Amino acid sequence: KSTITSLFLNDNCIISEDKSIIFSKGGSSLVLPSQIPLIKLSNKINSAKGLKLSNKIARDISNRSTYDVSDINLNNNINKIDYCIFLEKGNLELKELSFKNAFKYIFDNSIIPFTKNECIETNKMFLSSINSFLKSDSKFYLYKRSDKKNFNNQSYKIELESLFDKII
């Protein structure tokens, strides 16, 4: 996720690669700005980006370092969500999701402050929020990508851009 996000950091598009707060207003879905402007990347990937190393978090088990992206003015405003792309490992493919499949991905990837199926009223609010997101003018896609680690940064970005050009 982080590598794919890093490839598009300077392209004037908002990409959240971890957690986001999403709400609906006037038929659109909006995302609140990220409160943690950090991204974990391998040194090899960052060599092309030139991001500033952060001392806030040490290397992780995948030997990635944490880089500060606060200078990249992407996450300072509430933004409309045009596309929501879920990632999955598999053969390279980008496909639009049906309402039913998009619901499954949103439901499975949602973090909620209660146990699902514990409180009927809270579940109704949660399901209503998902329904509003799905009925908004946002589009939902599944991007299947290889889990290979030795890709060339520029060729991978070109490959991704050619896929994403089909939807953007």
Image (cartoon, rainbow, N blue to C red):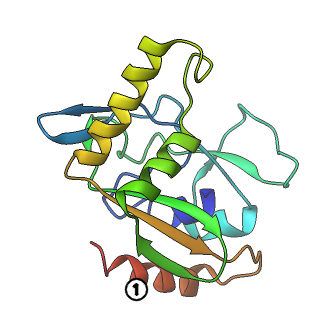
Q: Quadrant of the N terminus?
A: bottom right
The residue indicated by pointer 1 is 162
Type of the residue with mark 1: Ser
Residue closest to the eye, 166 or 78: 166
Q: Is residue 148 left or right of residue 70?
A: right
Q: Position of residue 54 (x, y in %)?
A: 67, 39
**At x 51% / y 70%, what residue is drawn?**
143
Q: How many marks?
A: 1
Q: Quadrant of the C terminus?
A: bottom left
Q: Position of residue 164 (x, y in %)?
A: 38, 76
Residue closest to the eye, 4 or 89: 89
Task: Point out the residue furthest to the left here.
Answer: 26
**Image height check: is 159 above or below 83?**
below
**At x 49% / y 66%, what residue is drawn?**
142
Q: Position of residue 26 (x, y in %)?
A: 11, 35
Question: Where is residue 145, by image quadrant?
Answer: bottom right
Q: Is residue 101 left or right of residue 125?
A: right
Q: Position of residue 82 (x, y in %)?
A: 26, 55
| Mark 1 residue element | helix
**Image height check: is 163 above or below 98?**
below
Question: Where is residue 28, by image quadrant?
Answer: top left
Circle 1 Cα neighbour tier, 10 Å, few/some/many (<14 / 14–19 / ≥20) = few
Residue closest to the eye, 118 or 5: 118
Task: Point out the residue furthest to the right here.
Answer: 61
